[in-house]
Each structure stands twice: as C-alpha cells, then as structure tokens.
Image (spheres, helix red, strand yellow):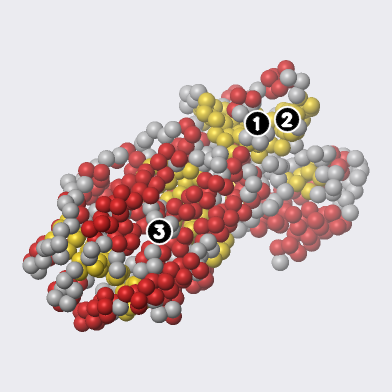
Amino acid sequence: MPQLFVRVCYSVLIYLVTVPAVLYLLWRSGKDKRYRQRLAERFAWQTLPANARGGIVVHAVSVGEVVAATPLIHALQQRYPHLRLTITCTTPTGSERIKQTFGDSVYHCYLPVDTPGAVSRWLNKLQPQAVVVLETELWPNVLQQCRRALIPTIVVNARLSARSARGYRRWHTFSQLALSNISVLLAQNSHTVRRFKALGCQAEYLVSGNLKFDMAPAVAALEGVFAQFTPVLAKRQVWVAGSTHVGEDALLLSAYQQLKPQFPELLLLLVPRHPERFNAVAQQVQQAGLQLLRRSSNAPVCDATDVLLGDSMGELMVWYQLADVVFIGGSLIERGGHNPLEAMSLGKAIQSGPHVFNFAQAYQWLHKAKAVNWVSDEASLVSNTAQLLLQPQVRKQQGEQALALYQQQSGAAVRSCQAIADYLGPDMDSFCVGVQQRGLSWYQRDVFHHETNLSFVPENWQQQGAVIGQSKGRNIAWFVRHNDTNFVLRHYYRGGLVGKVIQDKFCFQRVLRSRAMQEFALLRHMRRCGLPVPRPLAAHYQVSGGYYRADLIIELIAASRDLYTVLCASEALTVLQWQQLGALIARFHQQGVYHSDLNCHNILLDQHGEFWLIDFDKCAIRPNGHWQRDNLARLQRSLVKERGLHADFAWHEQHWLALLDGYNRQSA
C-alpha cells in the first residue's frame, strides 16, 4: 500500500475522531474543569511568546513522563543555557507538574492533536531545532512534518516490550508512518533496540539507560504534602498500594481486613491508577465497612481511619516516602505492571504480582537481588504483608538492595543529553530567531551578536566598507567580511519568464516551507551528517501581502574556486581527484541529498584539495530512486557543455570514468 495513501487515510481518521475527542474533554471537564481550559492549544491556535521560538521541544505525555524527563530537561538547560526549552504534554495533571517543577524557566503548552493543520501551525510557530519525545509517544503527523522540515526527532527513554512489538507488527502499515521518521532512538535496553530494528526503524540507535533511575526522590513541589502527613502517619504502619486497577482493589481491601486484627495500627493507602475510578473505589471501601478518608477532603488522618484514598494526582512519590511496604499495581491482573523505580529510589520493600512484562528488566534485577516479594492472590498477599510488617530488618535489607540497584543504573540523563548534543552538533546554542515586523530571521549568535547588527541589504554592508567582492551569475551574490567572518549574502530571485516580471516575490508559504529556511535547514542537516557544505549563518523571511521575499547568508569557503574555473584554467585534475569527487557525490546520495542543480559551477575545490558542494536552493532529502542516476547525468551534461564552449577546458571522457569509479566504490 503506497505510503501517501496510508498517510491520507491516517489523517482522515484523525480528523474524524477530533470531534469525539473534544466532546470527551468537555465531558471530563464536568469533574475537572481543566479539561475544557486551554482548548486553543489543542489545535495550536494560541499566541506564542517570541522567545519560545528556535529552541528544543521535549514532549512528556503525562505526570510519570514529566517526572522521568525532569533530570534530562535540567541537563539540557545546563548544556544549552541560551536556548528556551518548550515542554509539552497532553494531560492537565502533566501540565500542573511541569508548571510546579520548571515555572517560567521553560515555555509550556499542550501538544496539539495530530492533524496535519494543527501540527503545521504548531511547528511554524515554534520553529524548533529538535523535538525530543519521551518513550513511545509517537504521533505520525508530528514526526512526518518534522522530517519534512528537517527538524531532528529524538526518542529518549524508549521502551518496547515484546507484546507491544507484536502490536506494531500487526499494524505495520500504519506504524511505519511513525517509525520511518525517527532520527535518533535512545533506548532503555538492547532488547528495545532489537525490536525496533526488527520493525524496520532506520533511526540511529544508542542504549542510554532508563531516565527513571535518575529521578530525585525528594520533589520540592511535594515537600508541603510530605510535611503535612508525616507526623500523623509516623504513628501508623503504612501499606501503600500504588497504581491499582479494577480487580486489585477488592483483593487489597479483603487482605487488609484480614491483617487488621493482627496489626491494629495498619493504614492502607490506596492509590488507583486512573482518576475516573476514584469514586468507584471509595464506594468499594465503604461497602467493605472500612473507615474511609479521601485525600481530596484535606481532612486529617485519625486513629479510626482504615483506608486513605489517594484521590489526588502527582503525589504518589509522597505516599511511597511514607510507606513501610509498597505494592505496585497493575501486576495482579494482566496489565503488565507499573513502574517500580520510584519505590526503589526511596529504598522501600516492594510487593508485586506476577504480571510485570511492562518493566520486565527492572523486575528481573529486583528478583535476582531478592529485593521484590512476589504475590499472586489474596492468600499470598496477606501472608507476605504480615511477614514484612513483623520483620522491619527484612524490609530495611530489601529496601537497601532496591536502592543499590537503582543507584547502579543511574546516569541515563547525562548519557541521553550527551547523545542529543553529539547528534545535533555544536551550533545549537548559538542559534537565534529574530522577530521582525511581518517577518523574521534565523541567525548564529557567535557571528551576529544580535539581530540589530544583522542586515540582508547589500547597500548597508557597502556603507560599512564590509563588501569584499561579488559573484555575478544569474543573480548577484555579495561577499562580506564581518566580525572576522567572511560570508556570502544571497537574495532569492525567481527564474524563467515569470522571474522577469515578479523577480523576487514568491507565493506565500509558511516559514518552514520558505526557500531560505528550507535551504538553511538542509545545510544544517548535511553538516550534522558530516558532509562538506558551507555553514549556514543566517536566513531571512519577509512577508508582504500574499507573497514573501527571502535571503540567505552562508560562510565563504576560504581560498576556493569552483570546478568550472579550475578546469577553464587548464588545470587538469588527477585521476585520484576525480575518484575523490565521485566518492563525495556518492556520500551525498547515501544520505539522500538531492541536488537539483548539480553542475561544475556548484562544486568547489579549496586550497587543501578538498571538494565542497554549494547552492542547495530547491534541493531536498529523498528516498533512494532514479534521481541519483539523473543527478550524475546532469553533472556530466554540464561538463560536456563547458568543454564544447571552451577549447582549453581540462576535462575528458576518461575523467568521467574515474569519477564513476570513485562513486561506485563508495556506494558498494
């Protein structure tokens, strides 16, 4: 099935479910008004602050992912102090945690629904340099449009169980919409890498570990809650059941009733996984004849309280800190278990049911260290809990083993941040977006210290005496010296008959689709791939009515001449040099770089004998196809043409054979 057809089908489906999704949010808002607030962000209709542009986006779907991403976000802030980070999520609880943890140090908004229009608006407003996604929150239109705009997409803390991999294979046609557009995948373990590769994901891979091993046990935003409950719960034995599901609550309540006579000070702190179950679980507690206190009531825990229902969001770490024993939910049923790492980081004795495939490796480590207590039914739950409550030394020993495992696996945030920095390259932190009336510019701060000393008007540079030359091809390119940097300033003009009338006006396109920004982004992408192209220094996009104008500034390759000039001077290249040129073109083709005008004028030879390619206007990244052969044919035609025009042109057919030899050797 053609990928274009699949993308259209997916987008149509997303549009069809958008209305029910909005109705669902409005229904949820009956219990939590936050679900109907900020709806404009769900469709990227909001106004963004100017300083939010040009940074890095980190997407963490909800509270758990935000907590896991926190050490990585702090590491990115330290690595890129001049870049504004945008943190997105999809739930109100995740949004609250982002605000509590980061305040105004980041820009925060909801990730828009995955319709082509909403994603396009969002990307064109933010113009991010990279999008970092936590775990497997893979939205096809987000990833596909990022790839089209050459915005790297980096999946961090990736985890793919065997069960999930089977689901991806079952829906292979649609899963490829996401998997084929990932730039880098930083996995928790080698099993995840193997499964993604088996699914055909062509991203760069690295095992960087699990970010959740880097979570700070004490969350500053929760210190008040901890202080509130510590005095009264210190008098009680606290059994915390976290992230429970339907079918588990009844077992836990029954087990508690059997334990209560032996442990009269025992308090069951029950935390259902999903907020919509809070009322149902409260009703279960009351039907069991137990004394219930809901956290949301803010009433104090008294001696008569049997069950404290954690019907608040984002406070699970507090309850784990206060626990004597922790049961991890989702494991007595075939849900696959939930994350044990919070409890491990706090050095707690852990109980779990047998169904833990979602966190299989962590539980394998715990099992090997004898730091997990396996329970499978009500009887084993009662027996094991009683044993742990009677033996504080055993609890302490198991908690210490769990904490030691947690500490051994830490460092994923540092490794992930370094991998991101290695891939994105050294220019990230100096990249800026300058907002102007009806337009904007991208520029490198290390060359242009502020947008006020950045001009795309050649006359301004001439007045400063900074123009050091010009190149008169079809259009003039100006050579300028500024702050010890030599660069080329080029204004975009239309070609053909239309260009004689309209000249430099192009039909309106959004920023990321404009000529200058596309060439700027392509040059950055190719430099990340290690290809010899000029460094892009600035780009300009100016809107006027229904059209736009554009300019580009690139670094001047020192002491270089184009291949046409070299060959016209009767300076014949050696066979080895022609082979090197062929190998270089093959490297570009291997990276999918389509050069729309590959000819002898757009190939430079520098003073060190190294080749460079220039002029990537209207070029793109393409999948393999006949275009590579056509690209070579275009270069050959330009050489044949110039030899016919210049008798001293130092090129012969055997030189072309040498170039093809180098090309084929590199491609083999």
Mark 2 and mark 3: Cα distance apart in space: 48 Å
Residue 355 or residue 26, whichever sits in front: 355
Disc 1 designates what residue? 448
Disc 2 crowd rating (10 Å Cα; few below 14, some 14-19, many 20+) is few
Disc 3 crowd rating (10 Å Cα; few below 14, some 14-19, many 20+) is some
Disc 3 designates what residue? 217
Tag 2: amino acid: Asn
x and y percent of residue 217 in the render?
Answer: 40, 58
Disc 2 designates what residue? 483
Which quadrant holds the C terminus?
bottom right
Left or right for 510, reference 335: right
Q: Nearer the viewer, mark 2 or mark 3?
A: 3
Q: Indicate the quadrant where residue 472 lies.
A: top right
Left or right for 610, reference 142: right
Q: Earlier in the sequence, mark 3 or mark 1?
A: 3
Q: Is residue 499 above or below residue 650?
A: above
- Secondary element at tag 2: loop
Mark 3 and mark 1: Cα distance apart in space: 43 Å
Residue 47 or residue 73, whichever sits in front: 73
Q: Is residue 368 visible?
A: yes
User: Going 20% across and 54% down the picture, which residue do you hit?
Assistant: 295
Tag 3: amino acid: Pro
- Secondary element at tag 1: loop
- Secondary element at tag 3: loop
Tag 1: amino acid: Phe
User: Going 43% across and 50% down the picture, which residue do you hit?
Assistant: 59
Q: Earlier in the sequence, mark 1 or mark 2?
A: 1
Q: Earlier in the sequence, mark 2 or mark 3?
A: 3
Q: Nearer the viewer, mark 3 or mark 1?
A: 3
Q: Is residue 559 above or below residue 332?
A: above
Residue 488, numbered label: none
